[in-house]
Image: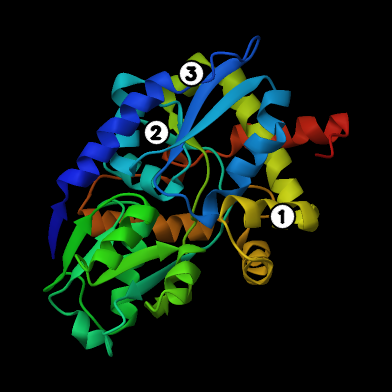
Amino acid sequence: MRFSITRHGIALGCAVVALCALGIDAGAQGLERALITHSSESISITPLIYGIEKGFYRTEGVDLQFRILRGDLAIGAMVNSKEVDYIYGAGTAFLAAVRGASLKILSHDFKSVLFYLMAQPNIQSPRELQGKKIAVSSLGGTGAASARASLKGLGLDPDKDMTFIVIGAASIRMAAMEAGSVQAAIMPVPWNIRMRQKGFKEMIFAGNVMSQPLTGIATTREKLEKNPDQVKKVLRGFLRSLRSIKRDRKEVSEFIGRKFNLEPKVVDEVYPVILQTISEDGTVGQQVLSDLLDQVKRETGVKREIAVRDIVDYQLLREVAREMEAKGTRD
């Protein structure tokens, strides 16, 4: 398997890093400012951006700003420059932690992946993808893992005769498909619907061949040690949003339609998928996490002993949930 990172993707990432430092709302008085990122504008970020728009985080005292930023750049900005406070790509954070980054995943919202492998209209069979270029958002994380699992599910070997092109956000991957510079791309819901409407072909739903926690909140160990109060505020906002997503169908559906420019009939297709795959309490099962750890260690060649608790820690989330329950907090 060969990898390539486009100069356009690198330039975009660097530009977003610059915006991260400048884009925080200076008008938010009396609130702690924090920045959270994700690699693409997919349906999987719905709980996060819905919670931000509804003011759940501001109610807790945090002016949480969201930016699109490629996963590897976000990890670097969290660990090194400290320009990013949190990352919403739990899969990317998991991979980075296995490789030694000082990160902790604090919550999960989706229990399964929401990706489709999309191909050019002229691709008639999976075998025609051999030797072709496959667009992904980064070399690691859930999207890349979904692409690999999808290719295997189609009877292909992602380690042979495939070139993975790192491009970045879903919008850029779709543009690359439209330009014909790549022959396939791993795309999150609802981008697969947009592409299907344009004539691109759905090859496989990655969720049928791969079960893996998708998104959630992760931060550095340093942030946990130095500012646990802010982390708890963010987790309270997260839980408020998670509960509202499951409860307020009409309002959430309208939000999804508006944010992702989807027609009501498409939203009606998307919302049940969200309900089916979203976590009940912001956690996923221990066995799922153990299987994921084994898989990531195999794929990365990491041999050292690692426990799930070294990477995923729901302690603060559960503490926050108990506090909210004791106070009778409903939203």
Horizontal arrangement in the rendering, residue 33 relative to residue 325 (left or right): left
Depth check: 105 or 330 in front?
330
Residue 311, percent across and down?
42, 41
Residue 72, percent across and down?
29, 40
Residue 123, percent across and down?
26, 84
Residue type, numbered disc 3: Glu
**Residue 210 makes an appearance in the image:** no
Looking at the rendered image, the disc whose residue lies closer to the viewer, 3 or 1, is 1
The kind of secondary structure element at disc 1 is helix
The kind of secondary structure element at disc 2 is strand
Task: Determine crowd level at label 3: few under 14, some 14-19, many 20+ residues with C-alpha closer than 10 A.
Answer: few
Horizontal arrangement in the rendering, residue 189 relative to residue 198 (left or right): right
Query: Which residue is label 1 attached to?
Result: 254
CB-based contact (under 8 Å), mark 2 and mark 3: no
Residue type, numbered disc 2: Leu
Task: Determine crowd level at label 1: few under 14, some 14-19, many 20+ residues with C-alpha closer than 10 A.
Answer: some
Q: Residue at x 64, y 72 (%)?
A: 269
Which of the two discs, 1 and 2, labels the residue nearer the N terminus?
2
